Image: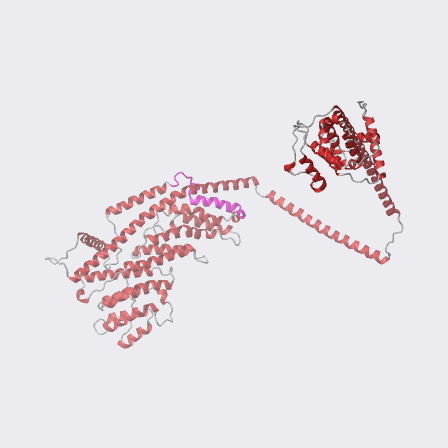
Amino acid sequence: MALRPQRTFRRRQVESSDSDGEGAEERPAEEPAEPCGPSAGGRAEGAEPARRARGSRGRGRVWASSRRSPGTASRRDCGAGVLLESRTVDLSTDEEEETHPSSERKADQSPSSNSSSSLEEKEVSPIVQIPDAAFIQEARRKRELARAPGDYISLDVHHPPTTSDSKRSNEEDPDSSDPDDYEKRILFAPKPQTLRQRMAEETSIRNEEASEESQEDENQDIWEQQQMRKAVKIVEGQNIDLSRSSESQTLKKFDTSISFPPVNLEIIKKQLNNRLTLLQDTHRSHQREYEKYLEDIKSSKTAIQNLESASDQTLNYKFYKGMKIYVENIIDCLNEKIINIEELESSMHTLLLKRSEALLKRRQDELKCESSYMQQLSRNAETSLNGSLALDEKDQRILDEIKARRTQRRQARALSGNCDHQEGTSSDDELSSAEMTNFQKRQGGILQDCKKVFEDVHDDFCNVQNILLKFQQWREKFPDSYYEAFIGLCLPKLLSPLIRVQLLDWNPLKLDSMDLTQMPWFTSITEFVDSSMDNTRKGDDSDQNILSAVINKTVVPRLTDFVEFIWDPLSTSQTRSLTTHCRLVFEQSASEKEVSKSKQDLLKSVVVRIKKSVEDDVFIPLYPKSSEEGKMSAHSKFQERQFWGALKLFRNILLWNGLLPDDTLQDLGLGKLLNRYLIIALTNAFPGPDAVKKCSQIAACLPEKWFENSAMRTSIPQLENFIQFLLQSAHKLSTSEFRNEVNEIILILVKVKALNQAESLIEKYHLEPSTHPVTGV
């Protein structure tokens, strides 16, 4: 067969464009074609995958088929496809088996790809033949065979009539054109092709490639034309915009058709006045800013002069830096030493607490032993042949120790010349020589360790006076910064550890203990406060409260610990020393508006300790009068000792006058002790000079502050029982030779402001009131 001559790129481009142009011209002139039969449409659909496969194998371009428009070509060349199929069927019978593959492949080609071959067939056979039903059925069968892949060898090309029957039924029913799955025949290899079929297939492939290339060139030309049109439109649009903007400017500039509002003289004058007012306001604001700047300049000059005339700033910086380092070093030192200080305080507190508990337990054991001994004497049980009681060894030892200590105290009083002493008023807190030696040894070890606390510290960091001198220099040089730093509020906390070390050996329960005013820290703080009087700023008195703050922080808590755990209310010496120190502490804070919380806790501890002592330590037995024959009997002596011991506690309680509130003190001394114990013991005793003496001692303990009101005619309610006992004693003694004792009772009534009762006694017994004072101890 003749080969197609080679074509250049330009020639192909022209031909493709011509063919496209002709197609574009012929398309609108064509009349709408009749729809193709089912065989043509089905053949076109079935041939499309085969053409794509061949095109991909021939040229190696997968995207070439996507640029084609198969819909238009299929509609145009529908009749050409039918003619091609009819022409293929008219082949000779001896070549029928060889022509099956080529006819199937030609039927599978789309009309768009085989347009050139279809035109040639039209020229050869211009007469259009309409195929019959058998021909259409056979063409459909061939199309279905062509759908199978062409890379296998067919085992059997003949098909049973069942397939044709089923296909014939599918032709009658267009909706069910495809056979069911169980009726389909699977072809495993294509049929062999003849030489004519292979030549026709190669020709169709070349035509397809040429059409694809022409389509690609056509698309390239179309794209270039579109880009050119876009560029032309953009330039024209810019020119149009520029022309429009220039026209608008010229219109705005030269348009005289615009009408303006009417203008008169009043409007112009009003606008000028508004403008003038605005300018005047602006001028005034600028004038104020100018004056402000002048004042700033003046103040800046003044500040510069003050700074130039002031002391050197380098020295000030050095001073502040030195004070900062000094305070940091003090704080670090105290933080390190505070642990040792607390351990020493705990050791000293434990030592004193053990001694106090030991003395209290010994007194309670001795009281129980004597009480049981007196009960045995009153029952006269278990007596021996010589008339002595059978006691166990422990009780006998306790009684012997009691007698030995009493004998020792009598001898000491005789040597001192104190003959007016009542049994039971002594504290009975003596320790044995071994116990005293052990106590002093342990106390000395604690004090020795106390001296080693600041042994490795410079005096500037552990001496209260040196520390206060540093802060005094700061206050004198820079008082503003000193008071702004609130140094007066910080010093008590800073000095507290140092003062606690000095108070470690201080015992407020000893009469010979050092007074607070004589301690070095107290003197240093007093001088520091006095020197601040001249430099104190107006309204700033923080330095004046340093001493009271230090006392509240260090001294008062230590006094509270002594009251709660160590103080013995039955000891007159301890109570006198404790009240003396407490009065001094309260005097230092007399300027305070309110009593501090630490002082309130101290007073509460005093009240609690007194109540406990009244309940645990007071015991006045009442024996039948038959056993009290003679003052020298054991029962009488034991009762007398217990009464005078309770009276001593009554005196010690009233020593807190001025520290405790009057109502609290009257409830503790008069309500809980006098009316509950002392009056009952006096009522059970024999009336006589001894009872009057005891009443005078009670009256002598009462504070004069309670009876200062000159308008009083009756005494306080808590003394009502005491006054009744005095009246009964006066009635009993008036009939005997003890008329002097009656006068003594009248003086007691006058002292306690029971004036009505005293006048009734004088009128009743025709007595003359005595002017001598009430006797007391």
Instruction: Give 16 or 521, whichever is nearer the viewer.
Output: 16
Q: Out of 135 and 6, give the one closest to the viewer.
A: 135
171 over 766 or under it: above or below: above
Which quarter shows the N terminus? top right
Q: How is colour applied across the structure in the image?
A: secondary structure
Report x, y in % for residue 529: 46, 50
- Which residue is at 29% across, 58% downward? 616
Residue 333, picture quadrant:
top left
456 in the magenta segment: yes
Q: Is residue 397 magenta?
A: no
Q: Quadrant of the C terminus?
A: bottom left
Q: Percent position (x, y) of residue 240?
A: 85, 41
Segment colored magenta: 453-481
Query: Residue 270 lies in what quarter of the image?
Result: bottom right
Residue 768 pos. (x, y %)? 28, 74
* Overall secondary structure of the magenta section: helix
Classify residue 46 as left or right of residue 692.
Answer: right
